[in-house]
Every structure is written in C-alpha cells, then in structure tokens.
C-alpha cells in the first residue's frame, strides 16, 4: 500500500508540474511560429496560441511512464498508447482540414491497443442491478467509447477554460469513484489526467493564453474513455460526463447528422453590443449546451463557463453516488 | 439559478440510465442461445446487441420528450 501511495504522489506531482512548467514555453514557441487563432468571443483581434495538446501529452506520458515503473500494469500501456494515438489524430486535425469521417474512424483505431493488451473486463457493471456479460458486444463498446469520449470533450471546447476545467472536475470524480469501487490501481492511474487538466486550466482559463486544440481535447477525452474501460467503470464515467453528453446529444438531435463545427453556417451563439454571449434565433443553428444555458438571456463568457462547471460538479456528485450504488444489490 | 432546468435534465438522464441498466441486467443478461455449436456465443451477443441498440434508441426518444428539450427545440 505504501508503494501505491508513493506512486500516486510522484505521478501527480510530475503530471501537474511538467504541464505547469512546459506550457509557458510552448505558448512562446507557438506565438513565435505564428501558430495562433482568433478568440472570437473577445473584442478586437485577440490571438491565442494553439495547440496546447503538446504540453498535455508530455505531462500524461511522463506521469504514466513513471507509474508503469511502479506498477507494470498492461492497462497503463494500453492507456498510454491509446492516448498517444488520439493525440496524433488531434494533431493531424489541428494542422490539416480533414473530412468528418476522419476523427471517429481514427479514434476507433486508437482503441485497438486496449483490446490487444486484454486490458478490459467484458462484464458491464450497473448500479443496484449488478453485471451483465456481453463478451462480443463489449468489443464494440471499446471501439465506440474512445471516439465518443474524445469527440464529446472536443465538442465542449468552445469557451475559455471549459474543456480543461470540465475535465479536471470529471477526472477527480472518476478517481474518487474508482476508490469507492476499490479499484485502487486504476484510481492512481487516473490521477495524472486530473492533475494535467488542472495545470493546463491555469493557462486555458478566462482569458485564455493557449487553446488545447483538437490534439489537447481528444487526448483528454480519449484518456478518460480508456481509463473508464480499463477500470471497468464505464457507467460511472458516462454519468460524470453527462453535461458534455447532453451537448453532443442536443447537437446531433438538432442537426440530425454528424457534422464538423466549421461546416455549420448558422451559428448557435452571437454577441450583444457589450460582447456578452446570446443565443441566436436562427432555426437552422444547432442546439448546444451553451445555447441552452443562454436561453434565459445573455451572459458573459465567464458566467457561461462557471455554469458549465456547476453542471460538471453536479454530474460528478451523481457519479460518486453511482459508485456507492455499485456496492448495493437489489 | 442560471441553467437550473439543465440540472433537472441531467438528473432525468441519470435516472433513465439506471433504469436502462436494470432492464439490461434483468432481461438481457439471462438471454442465452444454444444448439448452434460455436455460433452460440456470437448469436447470443448479436441478439443482446440488437436489444441494447433498441434500448438506447428508446432512451434517446424518452429524453427528447422531456419538456426542457421540447421547449428549447421550439424556441
């Protein structure tokens, strides 16, 4: 047990401080290379460095490789490879305009190492009712889960700090849940995700100095999905992610097809004269979580972000309750 | 509070998720097809997969009937 506690502390410190130390240099380098994009929610020509996924993946790899030294789990290797593959997918999408099919297909392929390493349990656990055995169907769940979690986090990366802040809350909720279901090893493995997100949030929060880009958002989302599978807490992980799931659900329900954000002509959100965010009345615009929040009236970008964080905390609490319910059988 | 209907929506999603899980475990779990040799497990999983997909569609349909969603669609 002492070894696990040391592993948890060391990997958390490495995860947090590597991102905290590297990101300022990354921002300067990206600015020097003119790799910046316009922040559309600010007045004037505010340019922000992108992608920040590079510091996120360095933090994750450093912490997880150290953890592997402590624990030698196949699950850690599967998480490292799947997360790295998702980073590469995101980086390609950051640099080149790819078709709508690219990310889901490439992320599905990223999930293959989890199957190859056998780092999963094909029983799906539900609160109150127990497990259901779905050996063949579970392969499909693995292949589908990584694209879903990756794209779900990517789809809420629309305002300053939201993706990293949301991921920090969801990851800590997932870690607590893993401790509750007594899966201590994977709880330790999930800690670096929470600390990397927290360190990145320092630079991503309003007003952002750097954006994670697809490489950052897909890395965070894919790692979250991989931990959920390897830790056997798929349902708990889905509960903690509910606000982001709602966002994807509303988007798909209103658009009736998978579509890239850049392909959407009618924007769901516009600005007031004092540059607050306000929901548009365009019928063709997709319904999103932000648009739903703004249905009550215009809000500042910071206020919308805080509302999303409140929703994340609420879902995180529901996830922890769900974890407790795993131990109860009807 | 800002966005308070969305908290209700998330809570409803959570309840539906737990109920859906119950249906899955109680009715889907025990399904077992035999008499086809090595194809038994594939057929069992296939039947479970089809029913699971129907359940997910029913879950989405139930969610789309929740008033907050309807209200937003119509606004």
Image: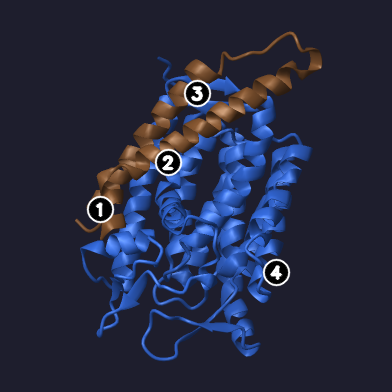
Chain colours: A blue, B brown
Both on one chain, marks 3 and 4? no
| Mark 3 neighbour density, 10 Å: few (under 14) some (14–19) many (20 or more) | many
Q: Can you identify the residue that label 3 sits on? A: B24
Both on one chain, marks 2 and 4? no
Dots 4, 1 in contact, CB < 8 A: no
Of badges 3 and 2, the one in the foreground is 2
Q: Can you identify the residue that label 1 sits on? A: B71
Q: Can you identify the residue that label 4 sits on? A: A92
Counting labels gives 4
Direction from residue A159 to residue B31 in the image, left or right: right
Quarter of the view holding residue B12: top left
Measured in 3D between alpha carbons, the distance from the residue under mark 3 to the one under mark 2, in whole angstroms, is 16 Å
Q: Can you identify the residue that label 2 sits on? A: B60
| Mark 4 neighbour density, 10 Å: few (under 14) some (14–19) many (20 or more) | some
Taking depth in this image into account, of B36 and A306 the one nearest to the observer is B36
Measured in 3D between alpha carbons, the distance from the residue under mark 1 to the one under mark 3, in whole angstroms, is 30 Å
Q: Chain of mark 3?
A: B
Residue sitting at x 48%, y 70%: A264
Q: Secondary structure at mark 2?
A: helix
Measured in 3D between alpha carbons, the distance from the residue under mark 2 to the one under mark 1, in whole angstroms, is 16 Å
Measured in 3D between alpha carbons, the distance from the residue under mark 2 to the one under mark 4, in whole angstroms, is 32 Å
Is there any visible trace of residue A192 in the rendered image? no
Q: Chain of mark 4?
A: A
Residue A206 screen position, x and y as percent:
39, 73
């Amino acid at each position: 047990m002492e070894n696990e506690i040391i592993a948890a502390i060391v990997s958390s410190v490495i995860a947090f401080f590597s991102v905290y130390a590297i990101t300022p240099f990354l921002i300067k380098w990206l600015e020097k290379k003119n790799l910046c994009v316009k922040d559309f929610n600010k007045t004037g020509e505010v340019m922000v460095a992108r992608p920040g996924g590079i510091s996120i993946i360095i933090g994750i790899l450093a912490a997880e490789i150290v953890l592997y030294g402590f624990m030698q789990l196949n699950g850690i290797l599967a998480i490292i490879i799947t997360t790295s593959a998702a980073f590469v997918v995101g980086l390609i999408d950051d640099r080149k305009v790819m078709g709508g099919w690219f990310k889901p297909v490439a992320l599905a392929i990223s999930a293959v190492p989890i199957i190859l390493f056998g780092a999963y349990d094909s029983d799906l656990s539900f609160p109150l009712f127990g497990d259901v055995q779905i050996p063949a169907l579970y392969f499909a769940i693995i292949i589908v889960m990584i694209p879903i979690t990756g794209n779900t986090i990517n789809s809420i990366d629309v305002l300053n700090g939201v993706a990293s802040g949301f991921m920090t809350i969801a990851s800590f909720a997932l870690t607590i849940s893993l401790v509750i279901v007594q899966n201590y090893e994977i709880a330790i493995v999930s800690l670096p995700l929470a600390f990397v997100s927290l360190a990145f949030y320092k630079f991503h929060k309003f007003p952002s100095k750097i954006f994670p880009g697809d490489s950052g958002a897909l890395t965070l989302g894919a790692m979250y999905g991989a931990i959920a599978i390897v830790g056997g807490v798929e349902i708990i992980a889905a509960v903690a992610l509910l606000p982001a799931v709602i966002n994807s659900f509303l988007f798909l329900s209103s658009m009736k097809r998978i579509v890239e954000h850049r392909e959407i002509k009618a924007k769901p959100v516009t600005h007031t004269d004092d540059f607050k965010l306000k929901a548009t009345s365009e019928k063709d615009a997709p319904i999103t979580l932000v648009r739903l929040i703004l249905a009550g009236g215009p809000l500042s970008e910071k206020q919308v972000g805080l509302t999303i964080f409140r929703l994340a905390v609420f879902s995180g609490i529901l996830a922890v309750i769900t974890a407790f319910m795993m131990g109860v059988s009807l | 509070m800002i966005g308070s209907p969305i908290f209700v929506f998330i809570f409803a999603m959570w309840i539906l998720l737990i109920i859906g899980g119950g249906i899955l475990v109680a009715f889907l779990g025990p399904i077992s097809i035999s008499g086809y040799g090595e194809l038994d497990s594939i057929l069992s999983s296939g039947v479970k997969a089809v029913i699971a997909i129907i359940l997910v569609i029913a879950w989405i349909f139930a969610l789309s009937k929740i008033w907050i969603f309807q209200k937003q669609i119509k606004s």
